Amino acid sequence: MKMIIDTDPGVDDALAILYAAAHPEIELAGLTSVFGNVTIEQATRNALYLVERARLDIPVAQGAGRPLSLPPFPASHGVHGPEGFGDLPAVRPQGAAISETAAEFLVRMAREQRGELIICPIGPITNIAQAIELDPAFAGNIRGIVFMGGALDVSGNITPAAEANTYHDPHALDIVLKSGAPTLMIGLDVTMQVLLTVEDFETLARIDRAHGPFLQEMSHFYLEFYRSKGLHGCGLHDPLAVMACIMPEILKIEAVPMEVVLDGDTIGKTQRSREGRTTQVAIDCDPEQVKAQFFQAFTDSAAP
Ligand code: BDR
Ligand code: CA
């Protein structure tokens, strides 16, 4: 499956990208960066580093540094660390981003790979909205959008109402939901059911000697954030969106007419609506099955 991941790396973004790189059925065609967990410059740098670390020969295109309509947000350094990978120091990639913007790259790739490309946004969805605005044919050229964001029947994680990615650019999500592109939402309804614990990161470090120890190291800071919220593990947010692209059957999915709140106290909330377009929404899963599948890709890729 041909896929572009749109990302703000980010600890769970790193998990998602290295999972995608490890999975034999995923053909990554590029990464696009976006503000969110870190600044846009840090997001691009971290994305480039992950591409090189995974020995992927694919482009990285830099995207939006702020939301479409809202004022800029400070980066979420308290959750993902000062450089994005927990308390690891800044990483240093060799390469640089391509000259096209993320939106330009997305539009071109969708035209060239018409009907084949899955877009997997795991940060604020700004770049995808910009691609839709740049090319009226974009939504029809892609195979679908599987995004991490939103919370339908559960509370938010950045405000009581909103999940962080949708809160950081609700206007962009509104454009995406109304674009006519097939959309699948992987929100907190499922991602918070699958908590990766200290022991899970030990397992990862053991089964994947190439990347597991690196992921385990960056997890300490992230797990500490979750511990401060009374949780014994971190949500499998971004990896679950990538997994849903290739194995949607591990999730219970419903078609829901859905909208995003664009102002007021509940801005960024994703909710059922009377008139909204129908979005596929993951509403339930079996956490043990998801975890087993997650580890499987790392196990297989590490096999001699
Ligand atoms: C989402 O917000 C970010 O902190 C994570 O990387 C994930 O994409 C979870 O709400
Ligand atoms: Ca993310």
Image (cartoon, helix red, strand yellow):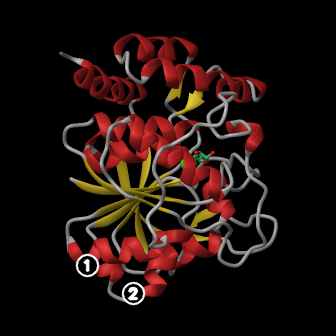
Which picture quadrant has residue 147? bottom left
| Disc 1 packing (10 Å; few <14; some 14–19; many ≥20) | some
The disc placed on residue 295 is none
* Residue denoted by label 1: 111
- Across and down, in percent, residue 227 comes to 72, 23
Residue ID at (42%, 18%): 204
Identify the residue at horizontal 21%, vertical 17% (top origin): 303
Work out whether residue 13 or residue 161 is closer to the camera in this orientation and state it.
Answer: 13
Residue at the image position 45 percent from the left and 50 percent from the top: 95
| Amino acid type for the residue under numbered disc 2 | Asp
Farthest residue, direction right: 265
Above/below status of 114 relative to 15? below
Q: Quadrant of the C terminus?
A: top left
The residue closer to the viewer here, 94 or 87, is 94
Q: Specify whether residue 8 is in view.
A: no
Left or right, 270 with respect to 73, comes to: left
Q: Does 75 sit above or below residue 68?
A: above
Report crowding for label 2: few under 14, some 14 to 19, many 20 or more residues within 10 A (C-alpha): some
Q: How many marks?
A: 2
For residue 135, which numbered disc appears in the image? 2
Question: In the image, residue 69 lies at what x, y percent?
Answer: 70, 79
Please tell me whether residue 91 is drawn above or below residue 267 in the rendered image.
above
The answer to whether the residues at label 2 and label 1 have Cβ atoms under 8 Å apart is: yes
